[in-house]
Amino acid sequence: MQHPKKRLAKMDRLERVLVADIAAMAKALDAPARGRKPAKLSRKWRAIEVSHSALRTLVKDILNETSDPRIVSPGGRRAIRDLNSAAKTLKNQMRDWAQINRLVELQIHPASVDLFADTVPTAPPSDVMGHVSALFIDALHTVANPKADTQSADAQDAGLHRDIALPISQFSAMLGAAYRICLAQRKTHALRFLDVGCGGGTKVLAATTCFETCDGLEYEEGTVALGTKLLDILGADRCRLIHGDAFTFSDYASYDTLYFYRPMKSTEDMIALEARVLDQAEPGTVLMVPGGLLTPDLEGAGVQHVSGHIYVTGISQPEAETLHDAARVIGTSIPGHAQDVSSEPGIWEPLLDVCARNGYRI
């Protein structure tokens, strides 16, 4: 057997080559799909295939050589153990090769996928899992909103609607579309979501599957208390329910995505609320509004329709069309509530981070 230090040096050298190739691929992928060149991406990925194959072969050979307890080496048993440990670490990091290869292939020639349909099927579930899921979703909503059919005198005087439960199928479709639009905007900070008129916060909880920080604004103080208690029990530490009035709330600009579903009864009040939201929202804010915005002159208000009942503030119509097309080629994978990773990303981390920003995850 060759001296362990020489084998380790060769393995380190091949690892550095692979890491450099991965960094180059990540940089090339970290751009809107329309600006990427498939031929260039294919060449860079081919370089990774070559360097990965060379390193994988060496790691396999080293593990075979160092697994025999009878082996003798100039460096002694400790050097053999260190070499074996380093090789095992690299083997573990390269374990997800097939899945990563698939992710990259999907991004070299990305498919264009609809963002959101205006009408989302709401037919009853047809399988056992569907029925069980619907049961638990309805139960959670009831626990979070036990007094959904009643309303305080203050809420009535303020002209607020009672709780309106949007089907989770429709909300999920809108949520996924909003997340893909945020990715198409190439936002790199932790994304923030706000539900205006959140009730007990079930939609706030659901939004954690896509957004890092999820808040809800609710007028009824008792509802906020009940919802907060439930979220605490569930350990939803990325959720916060805020007791407040949507007409006096002054922090809409802090959020990337705003959601509201007719919190006010009258059209006039809804238009007034939309005016306050639009006045504060930063350019590029995504609005999820089931039923659509009621503001008569959207363009004059500085907001453009993108898809379904989803809008974006502070952009022109051509920019909205470009954003829509860019979002269509963002992948449909989302962070999820508690996603498991099969192994430590290690050398693949830069590439996997970019893939996630493009909507592709293992």
Image (cartoon, rainbow, N blue to C red):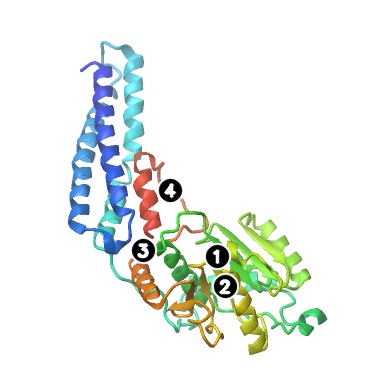
Tell me the SS state at disc 2: strand
Q: Are marks 3 and 2 in contact (CB under 8 Å)?
A: no
- Relative height, residue 203 to residue 82 (above, below): below
2 or 4: mark nearer the eye: 2
Residue appearing at x 69%, y 83% in the figure:
161
Q: Residue 197, position in %: x, y?
A: 66, 74
* Disc 1 residue type (three-letter): Ala
Sequence-wise, the earlier of marks 3 and 2 is 2
Q: Is residue 229 left or right of residue 64?
A: right
Q: Are marks 2 and 1 in contact (CB under 8 Å)?
A: yes
3 or 2: mark nearer the eye: 2
Sequence-wise, the earlier of marks 2 and 1 is 1
Q: CA distance from mark 4 to mark 1?
A: 21 Å
Residue position marked by numbered label 4 in the rendering: 341
- The numbered mark at residue 259 is 2
Q: CA distance from mark 1 to mark 3?
A: 18 Å
Dot 4 alpha-carbon crowd within 10 angstroms: few under 14, some 14 to 19, many 20 or more: few
Is residue 351 at all visible to an observer of this figure?
Answer: yes
* Disc 4 residue type (three-letter): Val
Q: CA distance from mark 3 to mark 2?
A: 22 Å
Q: Nearer the viewer, residue 284 or 101?
A: 284
Residue position marked by numbered label 1 in the rendering: 207
Residue furthest to the front: 300
* Res. 241 image quadrant: bottom right
